[in-house]
Amino acid sequence: MSASYPLTYYSKTMKGEQKYPFLNHTIEADVCIIGGGLAGLAIALGLLERGKKPVILEGGRIGWGASGRNGGFVMAGYAAGVADITKKVGLTNAKKLYSLTKQSQQLIRKRIDDYKIDCDPVHGYLKPSWYDVPGSMEERADFLAKNFDEPVEFWPQDKVREHAVSERYYDGIYFPDYFHMHPLNYVQGLGRVITEKGGLIFEDSMAVRVENEQATTKIIHTEHGKVKAPHIVYCGSGYFNRLETKIKRSCLPISTYVMVTDPVDEKLLKTAINTQAGIQDTRWSDDYYRILPDKRILWGGRVGLSHSAPTGDLLNVMIGDLHKVYPQLESVKPAIAWSGLMGYTVHKMPHIGKMADGVWYCTNFGGNGVGPTTAGGEVIAAAIADGDKTYELFKPFGFAYTGGMLGPLVAQAVYYSWQLGDWMREIKHKFF
Ligand SMILES: Cc1cc2nc3c(=O)[nH]c(=O)nc-3n(C[C@H](O)[C@H](O)[C@H](O)COP(=O)(O)OP(=O)(O)OC[C@H]3O[C@@H](n4cnc5c(N)ncnc54)[C@H](O)[C@@H]3O)c2cc1C
């Protein structure tokens, strides 16, 4: 049975859809990439641009996972904040890690232009603070500008509220280089370019077993076929099966949700969201949203453990969140909502690196993966094609064991501790 995309605004507005066959024979390739999300696609294109022939095995459709159903925000950095990364690896290496993602933002823009990928990129991103802590956003903006060459602008509360007309927000930071796009159309464009350049994509082709992982030629089995390759790259993220236990055990699959409204009258829209920039507040469990080309609002937010369903009816929950921030949009109705899984690590940095000769991984980007998966793609493609060692920068962010049999309990504890951080900050700044 062939897999289909989940019902989302993106699948309903997809352009240039291509379907790829399932693997039903034995093939040979330079590299076998497991998982056709943005990470797998970026590695494949990076390899083709360096003269290697990759094969992608995708269990569903390309971009069927988080990559084809996210908010579409293309940001620099990682799910872990720059302060935490700096604390762990020092400023010099933190800068190197950040700059990989700045380069990937530019590379994505270049690929959109060069390969004529029709995915509506729009520049600008505003991060308003959810907390009233005078000086803190200005300090953050200075830290980013001075140390990470990010051309940010500090916006005081008045300016923030001219663009995001809500009493929920205080000071903010504006990022002119960040942009947003239709992620599933970008995925479809990448698929087209990869196959035009000679890469192979197989959909409905879940990798179920790896034979000879330690040998020079690895054999990757799907239900009906095999790939023989000297290199294998794991990119299964929150949807990964149990193919590789170390990676599986150190991933916390976390759900998050997106809702899209009916089209909104432009005048009404401007009384609330008076900008084309994407907006995302400062909580871990944040709201992130943007205006779509047809004047609908795309509203993302909330997080849950993969095994817990959202409370109540998702459409009502999400529109309720929008109305809390913008009561002036009370008449706006929700049209469609969906969920997706993000693969998180305990340290919130992606897993990027080498496990053994010819065995690579590039996965678990958490809630900031649309841009950084291209950074990971470049790092892994350069390592395989040219012997480049940049991937070693990610060594300090290894596989943290999340509990074996106690995995779900450990995941729950980590999740609660992140959520507790939000609540503590909120209570503190409300009452003190
Ligand atoms: C609702 C939502 C909103 C988000 N919003 C944003 C945002 O606005 N900006 C941002 O930067 N990030 C966002 N994220 C996170 C971002 O989407 C992810 O970090 C990124 O897409 C991860 O890409 P990936 O390729 O690693 O994983 P995925 O896109 O999840 O791809 C993994 C793929 O691997 C396949 N797979 C798994 N196991 C196998 C196997 N054994 N064999 C074959 N195939 C396999 C799966 O079918 C899947 O297609 C969001 C995530 C969600 C869910």
Image (cartoon, rainbow, N blue to C red):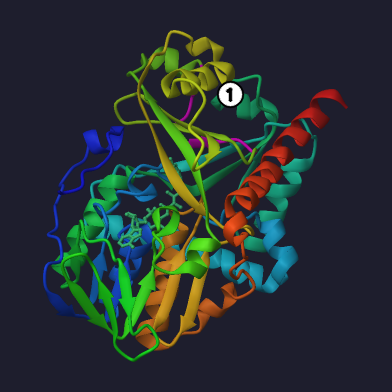
Amino acid residing under circle 1: Glu
**Residue 265 percent location from the top left of the image:** 36, 13
| Residue 277 magenta | yes
* Count of labels in the image: 1
- Residue 196 is drawn in which quadrant? bottom left
Residue depicted at 48% across the width and 23% down the height: 318
Q: For the residue with label 1, is its CB less than 8 Å from the closest atom of ligand 1? A: no
**Residue 92 seen by the camera:** yes
**Residue 75 seen by the camera:** no
**Residue 419 percent location from the top left of the image:** 67, 39
Residue depicted at 79% across the width and 28% down the height: 427
Q: Nearer the viewer, residue 145 or 413?
A: 413
- Residue 374 is drawn in which quadrant? bottom left
**Range shown magenta:** 272-282
- Residue 324 is drawn in which quadrant? top right
Answer left or right for 192 relative to 334. Answer: left
- Which residue, given by chain and number where applicable, does mark 1 sit on? 162
Where is 89 relative to 122, above or below?
Answer: below
Residue depicted at 67% across the width and 25% down the height: 158
Q: Main secondary structure of the magenta part?
A: loop
The single residue placed furthest to the top in the displayed view is: 331
**Residue 86 percent location from the top left of the image:** 71, 64
Answer left or right for 215 relative to 85. Answer: left
The single residue placed furthest to the bottom in the displayed view is: 216
The single residue placed furthest to the right in the displayed view is: 432
